[in-house]
Amino acid sequence: MTATTTDIEQIRAHHRSIRKLGAWTTASHFDIRASRGSVVLDLLLPELEPGEITVELDIDHSTVVLLVPDGTNVDDDELRRVGRGRVKDWTGTGSAEGRTLRLSGEMRNAEVRIHRGGIAILRLLLSRSSRPEVRRARRQGRI
């Protein structure tokens, strides 16, 4: 199944910092292009449709931080690394019933950081604009 252009969130961060926090999207396919910039994507609070989340990367000397729920399975087999690129996922592991986050594309001297559960929630609480949404999601039992 391929995504149509309306189902894809495009993020461009060339020499700048982009933060997409809170309930900012309903898409499950993301296209991130960045050079010498940083991107923070909240995939924890948005009410995304069930199924796989796909992130296509084309990043150069950049950092991408993905805030995901506990139990998310990260598949980075299709992600090509050039230079010192790496995926850092130190805060947890996936579970059998968790969603799949599929990373593809290319990263050149760049890094992708996966923040799960409590670390992701803490990052959201540090942003004044997303605090009410974190509280609402907690009351609804989504986090």
Image (cartoon, rainbow, N blue to C red):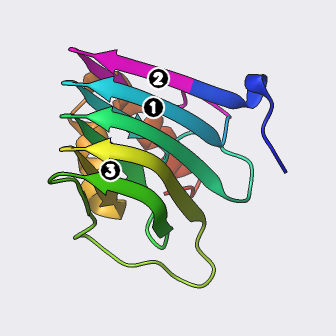
Picture residue at 46% right of the left edge, 23% below the top? 11
Closer mark to the observer between disc 2 and disc 3: 2
Give the quarter of the image for residue 62.
Answer: top left
Residue pointed to by mark 3? 121
Please provide the residue range marked out in magenta.
10-26
Question: Whole-percent x and y of residue 108?
Answer: 25, 42
Regarding residue 34, the answer to whether it shows in the image is: yes
Residue pointed to by mark 1? 32
Question: Whole-percent x and y of residue 128?
Answer: 26, 24
Q: Earlier in the sequence, mark 1 or mark 2?
A: 2
Instruction: Find out whether the residues at labels 1 and 2 contact each other: C-beta distance under 8 Å.
Output: yes
Near-viewer residue (15 or 117): 15
Residue pointed to by mark 2? 11
* Residue type beneath disc 2: Ile
Closer mark to the observer between disc 1 and disc 3: 1
Cα separation, mark 2 vs mark 3, equals: 22 Å
Q: Is 87 located above or below residue 111 in the figure?
A: below
SS of the residue at dot 1?
strand
Q: Residue furthest bottom?
A: 96
Cα separation, mark 1 vs mark 2, equals: 5 Å
Q: Residues within 10 Å of mark 1 (few under 14, many from 20)?
A: some
